[in-house]
Image (spheres, helix red, strand yellow):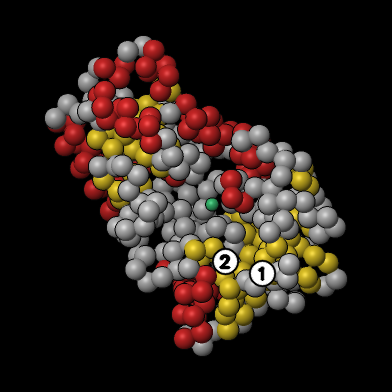
């Protein structure tokens, strides 16, 4: 295979065996075969794009008003990437593209098992050694302690995470607390997870809880989207809610980390540094291309291990 190139419109373009495979294209791909790894906004194509993707990705994209039309993906095999519902990597012509990937099992999400390949194209969001995530059970213990102590003081708790993926994990991990509320936008996505066979704890939507005056009554737990800062600070002000954010950036000092939360705990849907290294070794890849986050730092680390690696080069303008 020729080296892949990152093209602003066509995604990561691989020319191999007389065809082009366009990985996670943001725009129109023209003649190439498009592959969409998962339904996070930064990986979704323009609505109406024909692409190979999983049923879960198609449904979740549809819930966000992006239509992915089916495409004939002969010779392209999808491999579970363990990142969010429906996330897949693509295996073709001895190349494996991870999309966003997590090899750690969290609640109902099984960690990815990486296939053997000659060329690996991997995300490196957390590709420096300071990112080392604790086991999810340890995170759950800590947060259960935070909730228990808030409840003893009669204070409710808001659990904050990305609307798609993280919020469903959190709902699952802390679904034993009652009453359990969820932001309406998260409940809508929970519904897609249920349609796809994931048993989600039952929640009451925030609008209904507000309309029925439930939030004024005693401590409760609510799952809310990370981005809705004004919503969470309103709950803090009106109900003295304790806020807990779940993020891989916890403790990193990164701008994305804090977002006004009382606590930030490390729970990520990506591999940490050690897991990325383990994945590369398990794949047996001879050449590794890195993308997203610490792409230069991680490829430099692989070179120091004797593995040929570099960031995916940009296409010539
Ligand atoms: Zn993602």
Residue 250 vertical placement versus 184 (above, below): below
Say whether residue 237 is visible.
Answer: yes
SS label for mark 2: strand
Residue 206 picture location, percent across and down: 40, 23
Name the image quarter holding the C terminus. Answer: bottom right
Residue 86 picture location, percent across and down: 60, 47
Residue 179 picture location, percent across and down: 31, 24
Q: How many marks?
A: 2
Farthest-out residue, front: 317
Sequence-wise, which precedes: disc 2 or disc 1? 2
Farthest-out residue, top: 212
Q: Nearer the viewer, residue 266 or 295?
A: 295
Residue 181 vertical placement versus 250 (above, below): above
Q: Tell me which residue sits at (52%, 70%) in the image.
A: 295
Q: Tell me which residue sits at (69%, 48%) in the image.
A: 45
Q: Which mark is residue 143?
A: none
Q: Which residue is mark 2?
A: 291
Q: Which residue is mark 1?
A: 314
Q: Nearer the viewer, residue 2 or 87?
A: 2
Q: Tell me which residue sits at (85%, 57%) in the image.
A: 31
């Amino acid at each position: 295979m020729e080296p892949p190139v990152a093209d602003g419109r066509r995604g990561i373009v691989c020319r191999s065996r007389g065809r082009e495979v366009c990985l996670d294209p943001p725009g129109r791909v023209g003649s190439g075969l498009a592959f969409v790894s998962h339904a996070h906004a930064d990986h979704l194509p323009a609505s109406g794009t024909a692409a190979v993707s999983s049923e879960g990705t198609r449904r979740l994209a549809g819930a966000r008003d992006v239509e992915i039309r089916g495409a004939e993906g002969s010779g392209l095999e999808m491999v579970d990437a363990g990142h969010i519902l429906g996330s897949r990597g693509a295996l073709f012509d001895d190349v494996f593209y991870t999309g966003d990937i997590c090899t750690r099992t969290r609640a109902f999400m099984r960690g990815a098992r990486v296939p053997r390949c000659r060329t690996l194209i991997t995300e490196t969001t957390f590709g420096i050694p300071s990112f080392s995530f604790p086991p999810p059970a340890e995170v759950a213990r800590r947060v259960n302690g935070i909730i228990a102590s808030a409840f003893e003081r009669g204070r409710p708790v808001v659990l904050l995470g990305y609307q798609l993926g993280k919020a469903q994990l959190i709902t699952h991990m802390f679904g034993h607390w009652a009453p359990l509320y969820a932001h309406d936008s998260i409940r809508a996505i929970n519904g897609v997870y249920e349609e796809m066979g994931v048993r989600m704890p039952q929640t009451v939507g925030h609008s209904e809880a507000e309309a029925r005056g439930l939030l004024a009554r005693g401590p409760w737990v609510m799952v809310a989207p990370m981005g809705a800062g004004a919503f969470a600070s309103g709950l803090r002000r009106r109900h003295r809610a304790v806020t807990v954010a779940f993020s891989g950036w916890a403790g990193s000092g990164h701008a994305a980390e804090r977002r006004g939360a009382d606590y930030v705990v490390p729970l990520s849907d990506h591999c940490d540094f050690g897991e990325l290294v383990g994945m590369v070794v398990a794949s047996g890849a001879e050449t590794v291309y890195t993308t997203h986050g610490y792409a230069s730092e991680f490829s430099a680390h692989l070179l120091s291990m004797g593995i040929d690696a570099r960031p995916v080069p940009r296409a010539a303008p």
